[in-house]
Image: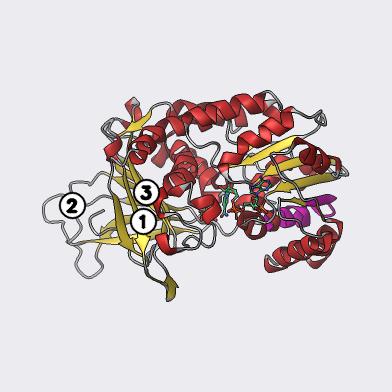
Amino acid sequence: MSDQPGIPDAESLGREPRSIAILGAGGDLTERLLLPGLGKVAELAGGLELTLIGAARTPQSDEEWQGLVRRSLEAAQIAPATVDALSKAARFVATDASDPEQLKALLAACPSSPVLYVALPPAMGHAVAESLAQLELPDDLVVAIEKPFGEDLDDARSLNEALAAVIPEDRLWRIDHFLGNATVLGMLGLRFGNRLLESGWSADEIEKVEIVFDEELGLEGRAAFYDSTGALRDMLQSHLLMVLALTTLERPDRITADDVHDRMAEVLGAVRLWRDDPHTARRARYTEGRVDGRFFPSYVDEDDVDPANDIETLAQLLLQVDTPRWAGVPFVLRSGKAIGSPRAEVAVHFRPSTPPEGLGGADAGEGTVLRMSLLNGDVDLDLFVNSADDTDRLERVQLEARPGEAELDAYGQVLAGILAHDRLLSVRGDIAEQCWRIVTPVLTAWAAGETPLEEYEAGSAGPADW
Ligand SMILES: NC(=O)C1=CN([C@@H]2O[C@H](COP(=O)(O)OP(=O)(O)OC[C@H]3O[C@@H](n4cnc5c(N)ncnc54)[C@H](OP(=O)(O)O)[C@@H]3O)[C@@H](O)[C@H]2O)C=CC1
Ligand SMILES: O=C1O[C@H](COP(=O)(O)O)[C@@H](O)[C@H](O)[C@H]1O
């Protein structure tokens, strides 16, 4: 497995059998990301005894669930022996998470130390907490709950309280799989492993930072989740603010969960809207178009979408980090669906230099840009060199760092953390609340219709003037 700091190796996963009860097992997340992540962890750990128990309201036979587990693992090219072992042991228990008796039956069906993995629409968090509160829980129960954690600041606070009443914080994992992305922990290595960058990592040298996740995917049949969530809650409130925290935090003493989380909470506490004005935020949604040749209907015409919900598929925030290090530096956070020119990166724009007279070129007034991919660990540095043919002219070139693919993807990293009881990649409760504090004024203004909901054609780069 990865030798990144804080990422557990096979030994630290332990050898005792574990059960993972997945609430929301019929959903997109389970088939596309969760099962492959678990499969890879089991494969790399070699012989880890995992029982995968599917749970959702819509019943499935054990055989149907085993078939889904097998398809998902095979599609992810998990080793055949692991596919066989995991799919044969898999069971399905039809469960409504809001019914304590059904949740009790689900936990009772776990043959070994249980992880209850909550992959439900965000509004269901409270129902799960209320159901758990009615039950006598196993001492070794671990609860993992997917982002977004709650629906706004008040909701996240009350969800934290409700969960604290049933499960201690050290057995509660708030999941944000971007924390398992190689780039995100890679950000700490890049910043603190290179004196050159560490000393230039402030408003003295940096002019602007963009954190962008524009993707080609559209709704993909996820209206039940997305049409009450939207891009701001789905992507910016959780994932992109985690990336912002790791980009801006002060140096932790050690790469331990407590030290890193303390530094993340501290810097997020200093994040504000650029003008203390919710209108610094923009929102838009896609209309009919083609993305890479694939036809997308307008968002409002997608199945099960209610146009009255006014849900955005593209959101952008302009933020400031109110600390001496970052005074005056704008941070642009943006994420959109059905974008024809996908882009997933942190782009750090350094201030331009002033070359001596006689040294020029088309881009000479611009600065160096450092780009970190949010899809893998790739880093590019766009810098200026003298042109080979005309040494008076500066030319922009790219230095590429390609650390290679990690054996575990983002979900694999996060899931390995749960099984190894390593909290580094879990979102601490106060951090989740800070993220909601930042976006809640915007959500309130949007709900009151105070910000126009703009439009962009699916397959375009977003509204023309953004
Ligand atoms: N899909 C993705 O790419 C990602 C999703 N996530 C997160 O994962 C979570 C789930 O997302 P996703 O899988 O896309 O959502 P889906 O809408 O695809 O699936 C939701 C699942 O929840 C089940 N469900 C709904 N209500 C209940 C209930 N009362 N009791 C038991 N099961 C219930 C549904 O089945 P049924 O109706 O049969 O009960 C279904 O299986 C969200 O929090 C999302 O933010 C995180 C990262 C990526
Ligand atoms: O959490 C989510 O993330 C995905 C994008 O992340 P990826 O790792 O799957 O590329 C996004 O498509 C989805 O809407 C969101 O819920």
Determine the secondary structure under disc 3: strand
Observer-nearest of 416 and 284: 284
What residue is disc 2 on? 365
Looking at the image, which residue is at 39% across and 27% down?
270
Q: CA distance from mark 1 to mark 3?
A: 9 Å
Mark nearest the camera among 2 and 3 is 3
Determine the secondary structure under disc 1: strand
Q: Is residue 119 above or below residue 141?
A: below
- Amino acid found under the numbered disc labelled 1: Arg
- Amino acid found under the numbered disc labelled 3: Ala
What residue is disc 1 on? 285
In the picture, measured across the screen, residue 211 lies left or right of residue 275, that is right
Looking at the image, which residue is at 44% across and 49% down?
230
Looking at the rendering, which quadrant does residue 406 occupy? bottom right
Which comes sooner in the sequence, label 2 or label 1? 1
Q: Is residue 44 magenta?
A: yes
Q: CA distance from mark 2 to mark 1?
A: 35 Å
Residue 14 in the image, given as x and y percentages of width and height: 82, 42
Looking at the image, which residue is at 54% across and 43% down?
185
Tell me if the residue at label 1 has its CB under 8 Å from ligand 2. Answer: no
| Magenta segment boundaries in residue numbering | 36-53
What residue is disc 3 on? 315
Q: CA distance from mark 2 to mark 3?
A: 30 Å
- Amino acid found under the numbered disc labelled 2: Gly
